[in-house]
Image (cartoon, grey):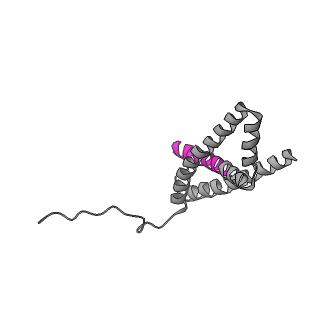
Amino acid sequence: MAGAAERPLSPHLQIYRPMLTMMMSIVHRITGVALYFGTLLLVIWLIAAASSPEAFDLVNGIYGSWIGLIVLVGYSWALIHHAIGGIRHFIWDTGAGFGPEARELMAKLTIGGSIGLTVLLWIAIWLVKG
């Protein structure tokens, strides 16, 4: 078009430098989606438990396999990470934690806390399981 005004383009990922808080936002969304899949696994387990001892044993066998355990550890991490991320957002909803140092600290605590609590959870599971 002749005479059309040049409009600025919206910034894109090529312009923005990836920041920890940006990555945490993306991971929070990914863990939210992963929780749908994990909830489906929980529903399958509950249906198997209500169906028959054979179905329950089959599902427990699958979930107790090495790949099943990897999925369960991943699901528990996603649940814990998403919950801690939700607490971080709740803190922001109160109007606190918006300074650069506070944002970075909360992001790091979310990562460290989710990994640490997941490790503690699975240590407790293995200790109880014997």
As drawn, the residue found furthest toward the right would be: 130
How many numbered discs, if any?
Answer: 0
Above or below, 103 relative to 94: below
Residue 33 in picture, x, y percent from top left: 54, 48
The residue located at (18%, 63%) in the rendering is 5
Q: In the visual, does 32 lie left or right of 112?
A: left
The residue located at (64%, 56%) in the rendering is 111
As drawn, the residue found furthest toward the left would be: 2
Q: Nearer the viewer, residue 77 or 42?
A: 42
Q: Nearer the viewer, residue 62 or 79?
A: 62
Q: In the visual, does 3 lie left or right of 90?
A: left
The rendered magenta stretch, by its main secondary structure, is classed as helix
The residue located at (69%, 55%) in the rendering is 115
Q: Is residue 125 magenta?
A: no
Q: Nearer the viewer, residue 120 or 47?
A: 47
Q: Is residue 85 magenta?
A: yes
Residue 95 in picture, x, y percent from top left: 51, 45
Extent of the magenta region: 77-97
Residue 92 in picture, x, y percent from top left: 53, 46
- Point out the image quarter for the N terminus: bottom left
Residue 86 in picture, x, y percent from top left: 58, 45
Quadrant of the image occupied by residue 67: bottom right
The residue located at (54%, 52%) in the rendering is 30
As drawn, the residue found furthest toward the front would be: 54
